[in-house]
Image (cartoon, rainbow, N blue to C red):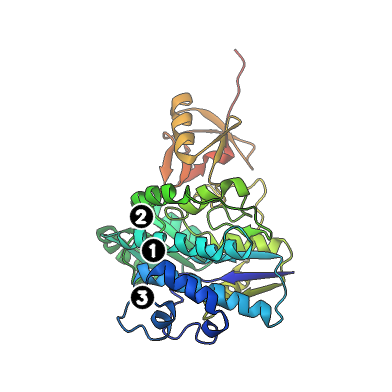
Amino acid sequence: MTTYLFPGQGSQSKGMGKNAFDDFPDLVAQADEILGYSIKKLCLEDPDNQLNNTQYTQPALYVVNALLYRQHLQQGGREPDFLAGHSLGEYNALQAAGVMSFSDGLSLVKRRGELMSKSVGGAMAAIIRLGADEVERCLIENNLTDIDIANYNSPMQTVLSGLNADLEVAQPIFEKAGAMFIPLNTSGAFHSRYMGNARAEFFDFLNQFKFSAPEIPVVSNVSAQPQKPENIHQSLADQITHPVKWTQSIRYLLDQGETELIEIGGGDILTKMVKAIQAGDEKPRRRRNRVIPDIIQKREPESVALNSEALTPNKAVEAWNHRHPIGTRVRVAGYDDIFVTRSIARLLFGIRAVVYMEGYKGYFSLTDVTPEVTNG
């Protein structure tokens, strides 16, 4: 089986797509009309040094990825069994799957880039040499809960997102823990709670568009599972404020028996990530009935099942605290013992509904916690 992967922001470079623009003049003309400038000139010449500006980067990558995909198929590439894209690249995956037209996809990406470029006061940093579990634990133990995880890129590369001041405080803490802390050249705290205004505006914009059911399964950044037609609007809006679950997405594909993952774009960033995930994936990819008490569980879905109700994490926290006081006796998936809650439920990293237990140094996901039923 074959999966095509589309890269996102960070993979741009001057000269990208140079061998594809002339093969698709009609699409290039559509792009110029939608954008109001020459996309070919931006990508090949970048005369005004705008290619690294989010507002221009995202449309440029979308167009180049789309052209290179069509070129790949014309040159004999086979139709994929799955599609996936990293952040912005997910729009290319959806377009390739027939969910949206080239022009609709570009209109969405144009607006997305404009809204995200307005973000100020935020920053991002890559954490290298620490596993995602260790990164999460470091955030919790040092009370850095105003920082969100933006990207799970590979087992040893996690990206943080937050306010400048908070990341400055975090840097020496992570370096002391043995990590490389690499500030990223971004204009805002992408894929975090701090993009809430951009998400709200983009959600309204999304409602102007109608999407078709994917003809090819597309793995979502938000859920690391194939996109469901009825959730596409919500998922694309949530992607702005939620982490890119790239490691989890690749693990899902590997669990399906995927043997050929091909990057379509101007570079090999995703190819390197895939190799890192394959090389560093020593733990079982499918964790069944197992809870690690001193870290936050990574497999939290975007909606939480609580007492048979499908709830968002925010609603799950509200519902739990309404029904279950501190000191509630509970059962936890994977354990035979009865646990007792030591805190109210809370939303961690902006997306995870969790609760603290007595006798354990760490949070448990509400998805693994069930109140003990007593008689009388």
Query: What residue do we see at 67% from left, 64% from top?
Result: 82
Camera-nearest label, 3 or 1? 1
Query: What residue do we see at 70% from left, 69% from top?
Result: 80
Mark with earlier residue (3, 1): 3
Q: Amino acid at mark 2?
A: Ile
Mark with earlier residue (1, 2): 1
Quadrant for the N terminus, please: bottom right
Secondary element under disc 1, as helix, strand or loop, is helix
Closer to us: 120 or 124: 120
Mark with earlier residue (2, 3): 3
Report x, y in % for residue 147.
35, 55
Q: Which residue is mark 2?
A: 147
Whole-Å distance between the Cαs marked 1 and 2?
Answer: 22 Å
Image quadrant assignment for residue 56:
bottom left
Q: Which residue is mark 1?
A: 113
Q: Residues within 10 Å of mark 2 (few under 14, many from 20)?
A: many
Q: Residues within 10 Å of mark 1 (few under 14, many from 20)?
A: some
Closer to us: 157 or 208: 208
Q: Which residue is mark 3?
A: 52
Mark yes or no: residue 355 visible.
no
Report x, y in % for residue 328.
50, 27
Quadrant for the C terminus, please: top right
Q: Amino acid at mark 1?
A: Gly
Q: Amino acid at mark 3?
A: Asn
Report x, y in % for residue 107.
45, 61
Secondary element under disc 3, as helix, strand or loop, is loop
Instruction: Check if mark 1's residue and mark 2's residue have beta carbons within 8 Å.
Output: no
